[in-house]
Amino acid sequence: MPRLRFKVHAVIQMEERGLNVEDVRVALDNGEDIEARPDERPYPARLVLGVCRIGVLHVAVRDNIENDEIIIETAYRPDPVLWEPDFKTRRKSQ
């Protein structure tokens, strides 16, 4: 697996949300891409849905293929108000 690199913003948010590095690693290991933005710069972006010790987790990442690393931008428990029950589909605005 590529090396994980955490942005400072991600670390701060993870601490506020009670998440740790292992939660993110586990969610990425068993997760699936639910959104992909391959044309994003400087690196392709994607949103991963996975499960960790606290339940369902979304992890926003960028793939730096040249350096064999995944850059973690943020991780959070998806809000059921904003996501369908499968947590894969965003709810339509009302």
Image (cartoon, helix red, strand yellow):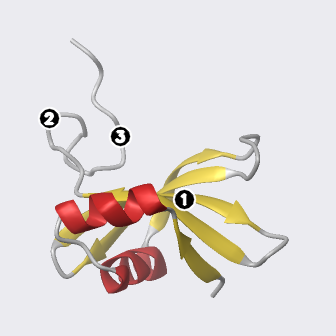
- For label 3, the residue is 89
In this rendering, the label closer to the viewer, 2 or 3? 2
Within the image, what quadrant is residue 4 found in? bottom right
What kind of element bears circle 1?
A: strand
Question: Is 26 in front, or is 8?
Answer: 8
In the current view of this chain or complex, which residue is farthest to the right?
66
- For label 2, the residue is 81
Q: What amino acid type is highlighted by mark number 3? A: Thr
Image point (79%, 76%), residue name: 67
Question: Reading the chain from its start, which is encountered first: label 2 or label 3?
Answer: 2
Q: Is residue 59 visible?
A: no
Within the image, what quadrant is residue 69 found in? bottom right
Q: Is residue 31 visible?
A: yes
In the image, taking residue 23 as reference, residue 5 lies left or right, namely: right
Image point (29%, 79%), residue name: 20
Q: CA distance from mark 2 to mark 3?
A: 11 Å
What kind of element bears circle 3?
A: loop
Q: CA distance from mark 1 to mark 2?
A: 23 Å
- For label 1, the residue is 61
How many dots with numbers?
A: 3
The N terminus: image quadrant: bottom right
Mark 2 neighbour class, 10 Å CA radius: few under 14, some 14 to 19, many 20 or more? few
In the current view of this chain or complex, which residue is farthest to the top?
94
Pointers 1 and 3 in contact (CB under 8 A)?
A: no
On screen, residue 84 above or below 17 = above
